[in-house]
Structure formats: structure tokens, C-alpha cells
């Protein structure tokens, strides 16, 4: 994706490094001085601060309204979003903030950070004299079947973008409440590469009419349908950048691909009995990822068993490393990426019955109890040693405890 900010890089660097922030409003200048104060209760990482500064520069100096931050998974996008919400609230008189995400796992993690204005309080984003704004940044999480009153009453509204789609009555009602309100809003589209569909584009187009600002955040800006988001990319902070930090912000990744034919993945369609090798599944994988296939392919038990056995060897290595280097600060977790819900159920059953690992299955159909367990993975008191999900490797699993990932599919398509 093209970096729209490239022609302005040197001017931005001069502006940022001056620490005087010329050509912005006085309110914004005071806010940025507050944001970068050395005695903040919790400091932003340098790349997070830079992301906020670029958003401010693009909005106030370049007059751009629709921006995109390309930040690696695990790079702290939520704190950046929180800082920008605080800036828009304090400096631009915006009072309604819509946070959109692609799935319930991402939504649950955002809910943890924005519930009770936690992100604003933890980082001290609100300057003296404006701390009472935290009481206006109350969170409403859109839920299926619930009325729209929370959308009207709350300063921060969180939900899956599908909850605004016009193909269902609930989505029509939710979007109508936003469209008919007297106030302009700011839209934060987390994991903006995801959920490509005509309704996705139509919803963002409708929101454009009532939004004064939109920020897309993603680690992979090129969408699954091959298109790029329609916002302007202003910042790139990738895997190499995060690993070059001292200490590294994200873990180093080691890809282990066994070459033995005996562990090659094969799949069976239980409805027809058809069997395919992993190399024959490329087209089907693409259809599954795009939501175009309802076929419940499952990995054959023998190669699944062998792949799990290899993954558990790696997990034991990570356990030893956690004990010796991290002194038991976290419990390494095995994360299994299945291709369908039936496939995920089979993997969970095998992990529990044959390998005796306490395993959590998390899908879009998971109930609140299971989602709460997912939020607590790797924390003290969590009983789970493995988690199985469906095609959800990229969003919502950027947590330190996930130490080994087993893909029941190809690492990459052709």
C-alpha cells in the first residue's frame, strides 16, 4: 500500500523534533506537551508517540480526515487509539467515538482497555482540568438484540462492523441512530484490512457523512480481497522495527516446517468422503477465508496427531525458556489454527483426550464464559495450556503467552 505521508516526512520530522509543534491549535500544542511529559504514569513507546504525532500533523496541518496506521501486531495500537480519542475530545470538541473491529476476540480486548476509561487513566492522557472527561467517555458495547439507547448515551461505542450492516434490522437501527444524531463522530476501524465485502464498504461510506475523523489501524493493510483501504497510510512500523527495539517489543518468530511426508496434512470432507492433500486445498482455503464455503473440511486424525506431537515438543522448549529466562512470569500457550469449526472441535478433543492438555475452543459462536476465559489466557489462575480457533491467527491473539502456533493448513497460499 502506498505511503501517502512520504512527501511530508522531512517537514514532519522537523516539526516533531522541535517540540514546539508550530502551526497547530494552542489546545493541541498543550495536549502534546502533556502527552510527552516525562512524569506520565505510563509512557508511550516511541513509535506509539510518533503514530499519534503523525495523526495530529496529518489532520491539523494537511487537513486529511481519513488516516491509516500500519503497526505490527503486538505494537500497541490500542494505546495509540486511546491517545487520539483523548486529543479529539480535548482539542476538537468531539464527543462520540465509534470503535469498529472484525471479530469478538478483538472486541473483547478493546473492551478491557476502554471499560471504565481504563486506557485514559492508565496513561494519564487527559490534561489537568479535563480529567472529568473520563466520565463522558463511558463505553457501550453493541450486543445482538439490544436496543440502541446505549449508542445514544455513551461517549465510546464498540462493536463489530457487521452490527451496522443494512442487511439486518438490528444493523439498520444501529446505523440510523448514529446517522440521525446531532453530533459528528470519530471512527476507529481496528484491523481495517479485514472483513472485505460490499456491505463493509457501504457502511464506511455511510459513516463518512457523519464523521469528522477516521483512523484505520492494521498490521496488514492490503485487504483479503486484494484491495487497499481507502484511507491514507501515514505510518509504517513493521516486524523488523519492533524486533530491533531494545528490548524487542515482539517475540522473534521461528518457523518450523517438518518436511517428512508422514506428517503432511491431509483433509476429508465428511459429507462426501472426498480426501485432499494440503497442496490440493489452496482454492478451498481461499474460499473459506472469504466466507464463501460452508463445507466443513477436517484434518485427518493421523497427520493432526503427528503435527500436535511436534508442536508440543516446541511448547516444552518454550516452557523451559519461560522458567529459566522469564522466571515463570507467564505460562506458554499452544495456539492451534483450524480451518473450520468441525476441524477445531476435533483438534480440541484430541488435545484433551490424547495429550491431556486443558484446551479452550474459541470461535465466533463462543459464549461470554468462553470469551472471558480467552481474555485470561496465560494469566495467573488460567487453567488452559492450549487454545484452538478458526482462521483467527492475525487478530486478537497478540499476547505474550501465545508461544507456539500450529497451523492446520499451509503457512502461505500460492
Image (cartoon, rainbow, N blue to C red):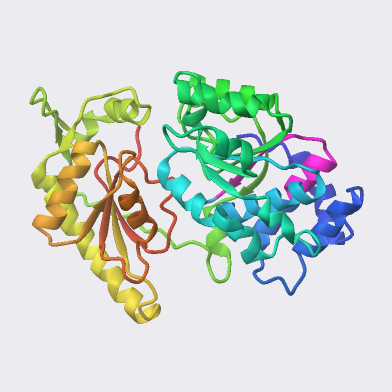
Residue 280 in the image: state x and y as whole percent.
22, 29
Q: Quadrant of the N terminus?
A: top right
The answer to which image quadrant residue 184 occupies is: top right
User: In the visual, does 162 lie left or right of 351?
Assistant: right
- Was residue 11 drawn as part of the magenta stretch in this picture? no
- Was residue 64 drawn as part of the magenta stretch in this picture? yes
Q: What residue range appears in magenta?
A: 54-71
Rendered residue at 21%/62% (across/down): 312
Q: Is residue 75 visible?
A: no
Q: Look at the picture and state if 247 lies above or below 62.
A: below
Rendered residue at 91%/53% (across/down): 26
Q: Look at the picture and state if 180 lies above or below 104.
A: above
The answer to which image quadrant residue 321 occupies is: bottom left
User: In the visual, does 330 lie left or right of 183?
Assistant: left
Q: Is residue 167 visible?
A: yes
Rendered residue at 63%/22% (across/down): 206
Please name whichever residue, 21 or 200, is drawn nearer the observer in this view of the structure.
200
Please name whichever residue, 171 or 19, is drawn nearer the observer in this view of the structure.
171
Residue 115 in the image: state x and y as whole percent.
54, 54
User: In the visual, does 267 lie left or right of 89?
Assistant: left
Residue 199 in the image: state x and y as whole percent.
50, 21
Please name whichever residue, 156 or 282, is drawn nearer the observer in this view of the structure.
156
Amino acid at each position: 500500500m502506498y505511503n501517502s505521508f512520504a512527501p511530508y516526512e522531512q517537514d514532519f520530522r522537523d516539526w516533531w523534533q522541535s517540540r514546539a509543534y508550530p502551526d497547530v491549535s494552542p489546545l493541541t500544542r498543550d495536549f502534546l506537551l502533556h502527552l510527552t511529559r516525562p512524569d506520565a504514569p505510563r509512557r508511550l513507546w516511541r513509535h506509539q508517540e510518533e503514530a499519534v504525532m503523525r495523526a495530529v500533523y496529518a489532520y491539523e496541518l494537511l487537513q486529511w480526515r481519513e488516516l491509516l496506521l500500519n503497526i505490527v501486531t503486538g505494537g500497541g495500537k490500542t494505546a495509540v487509539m486511546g491517545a487520539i480519542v483523548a486529543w479529539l475530545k480535548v482539542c476538537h470538541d468531539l464527543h462520540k467515538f465509534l470503535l469498529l473491529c472484525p471479530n469478538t476476540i478483538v472486541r473483547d480486548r478493546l473492551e478491557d482497555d476502554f471499560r471504565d476509561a481504563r486506557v485514559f487513566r492508565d496513561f494519564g492522557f487527559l490534561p489537568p482540568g479535563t480529567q472529568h472527561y473520563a466520565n463522558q467517555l463511558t463505553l457501550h458495547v453493541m450486543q445482538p438484540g439490544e436496543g440502541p439507547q446505549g449508542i445514544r448515551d455513551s461517549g465510546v461505542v464498540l462493536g463489530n462492523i457487521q452490527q451496522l450492516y443494512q442487511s439486518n434490522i438490528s444493523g439498520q437501527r444501529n446505523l440510523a441512530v448514529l446517522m440521525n444524531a446531532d453530533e459528528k463522530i470519530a471512527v476507529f476501524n481496528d484491523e481495517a484490512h479485514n472483513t472485505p465485502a460490499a456491505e463493509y464498504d457501504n457502511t464506511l461510506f455511510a459513516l463518512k457523512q457523519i464523521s469528522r475523523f477516521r483512523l484505520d489501524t492494521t498490521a496488514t493493510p492490503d485487504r483479503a480481497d486484494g484491495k487497499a483501504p481507502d484511507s491514507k497510510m501515514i505510518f509504517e512500523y513493521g516486524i523488523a522495527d519492533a524486533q530491533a527495539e531494545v528490548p524487542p517489543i515482539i517475540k522473534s518468530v521461528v518457523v518450523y516446517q517438518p518436511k517428512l511426508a508422514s506428517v503432511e496434512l491431509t483433509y476429508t470432507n465428511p459429507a462426501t468422503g472426498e480426501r485432499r492433500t494440503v497442496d490440493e486445498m489452496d482454492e478451498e482455503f481461499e474460499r473459506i477465508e472469504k466466507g464463501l464455503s460452508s463445507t466443513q473440511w477436517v484434518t485427518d486424525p493421523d497427520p493432526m496427531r503427528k503435527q500436535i506431537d511436534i508442536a508440543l515438543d516446541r511448547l516444552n522448549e518454550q516452557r523451559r525458556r519461560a522458567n529459566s529466562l522469564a522466571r515463570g512470569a507467564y505460562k506458554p500457550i499452544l495456539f492451534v489454527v483450524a480451518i473450520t469449526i468441525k476441524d477445531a472441535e476435533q483438534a480440541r478433543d484430541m488435545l484433551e483426550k490424547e495429550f491431556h492438555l486443558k484446551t479452550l475452543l474459541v470461535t465466533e459462536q463462543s459464549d461470554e464464559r468462553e470469551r472471558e476465559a480467552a481474555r485470561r489466557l496465560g494469566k495467573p489462575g488460567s487453567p488452559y495450556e492450549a487454545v484452538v480457533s478458526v482462521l483467527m491467527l492475525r487478530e486478537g491473539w497478540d499476547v505474550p503467552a501465545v508461544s507456539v502456533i500450529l497451523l492446520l493448513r499451509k503457512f502461505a497460499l500460492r
